Image (tube, helix red, strand yellow):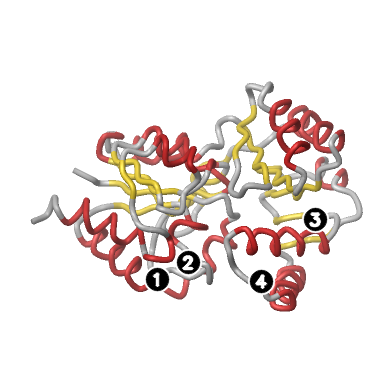
């Protein structure tokens, strides 16, 4: 029996247009009508995660920033986990050593030291996914986020770390140099207090060890008094592995990374084919017929 579902967003619930298909929307509504709690579990910050969900009218809890923040259906923050000063120094020392660009995600917003490098990241991610990116549209999106204040350009990240009330939740590092990325990842994994994952081939997502999707899924399941054997998790990349490992029904997308497929018990169609919706209907509906 499935009573709790956690689904990743990019490459999973969302198609290449960063939209939730009607088939996925209807499947989530069907699950909810059967008393199943459906949770969005993403590396995105809440305001980025909510953008494609809001037009659908769906009401769901959120696991954001890989588990560094959990919000209920009313968007209330129920849990946070952040990096302390010592952890931030360890991480940034390694990233600077290998000259790897990174963004800083806090409870106040996302920070960049170079919006042109942000543009290159989005272009590379789109091309990796097999899409032809619209450079001006992506640039317009970045400028819109800067104007809204959800993305902030600063001269130096050090000004953020000592700001009262501001918590560093995640660092997103990016480079197209795979050797540098592999070396940095190896050094960062030596710190047991950190969780190192990835949402794309050329990035690293760095959070506190408590900030993982699997840990967050366990926390929500405990709050709802649902055994993990009655949970489903769906994902496509390395930052989804921790929740696929703990869920009773672990489902990888057809377009998932090989490492993600290796830990999943089941495989569904790709994100372009509404694989999330099809998996939900297959496993939830068969229990209600």
Which label is found at residue 12?
Answer: none
Vertical order, 217 against 288 (above or below): above
Q: Residue at x 73, y 74 (%)?
A: 135
Circle 1 SS class: loop
Disc 1 + disc 2, Cβ < 8 Å: yes
Q: Look at mark 3 in the image and give the residue it sits on.
A: 112
Q: Position of residue 239 (x, y in %)?
A: 54, 42
Which label's residue is closer to the chain start, 4 or 1? 1
Q: Look at mark 1 in the image and give the residue it sits on.
A: 21
Q: Residue at x 81, y 47 (%)?
A: 101
Q: Residue at x 30, y 34 (%)?
A: 228
Q: Position of residue 20 (x, y in %)?
A: 43, 68
Q: Look at mark 2 in the image and give the residue it sits on.
A: 15
Circle 2 SS class: loop
Give the alpha-carbon distance from disc 1 to disc 3, as whole Å.
31 Å
Which label's residue is closer to the chain start, 1 or 3? 1
Asked which quadrant contains residue 197, the reply is top right
Q: Look at mark 4 in the image and give the residue it sits on.
A: 133
- The total of numbered circles placed on residues is 4
73 sits to left or right of 195: left
Mark 4 vs mark 2: in front: 4
């Amino acid at each position: 029996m499935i009573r709790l579902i956690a689904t990743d967003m990019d490459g999973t619930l969302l198609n290449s247009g960063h939209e939730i298909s009607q088939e996925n929307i209807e499947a989530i509504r069907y699950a909810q009508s059967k008393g199943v709690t459906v949770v969005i579990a993403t590396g995105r910050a809440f305001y980025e995660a909510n953008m494609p969900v809001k037009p659908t009218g769906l009401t769901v809890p959120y696991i954001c920033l890989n588990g560094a923040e959990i919000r209920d259906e009313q968007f209330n923050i129920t849990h946070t986990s952040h990096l302390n000063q010592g952890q931030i120094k360890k991480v940034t020392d390694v990233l600077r050593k290998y000259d790897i660009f990174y963004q800083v995600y806090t409870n106040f917003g996302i920070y960049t030291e170079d919006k042109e490098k942000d543009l290159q990241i989005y272009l590379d991610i789109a091309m990796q996914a097999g899409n032809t990116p619209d450079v001006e549209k992506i640039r317009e999106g970045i400028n819109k986020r800067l104007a809204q204040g959800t993305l902030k350009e600063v001269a130096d990240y050090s000004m953020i770390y000592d700001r009262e009330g501001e918590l560093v939740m995640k660092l997103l590092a990016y480079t197209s140099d795979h050797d540098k990325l592999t070396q940095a990842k190896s050094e960062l994994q030596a710190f047991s207090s950190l969780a190192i994952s990835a949402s794309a081939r050329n990035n690293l997502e760095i959070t506190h060890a408590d900030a993982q999707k699997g840990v967050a899924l366990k926390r929500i399941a405990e709050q709802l008094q649902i055994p993990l054997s009655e949970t489903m998790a769906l994902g496509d990349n390395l930052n989804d592995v921790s929740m696929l490992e703990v869920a009773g029904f672990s489902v990888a997308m057809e377009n998932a990374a090989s490492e993600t497929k290796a830990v999943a018990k089941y495989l569904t169609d790709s994100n372009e084919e509404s694989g999330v919706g099809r998996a939900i209907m297959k496993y939830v509906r068969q229990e209600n017929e």
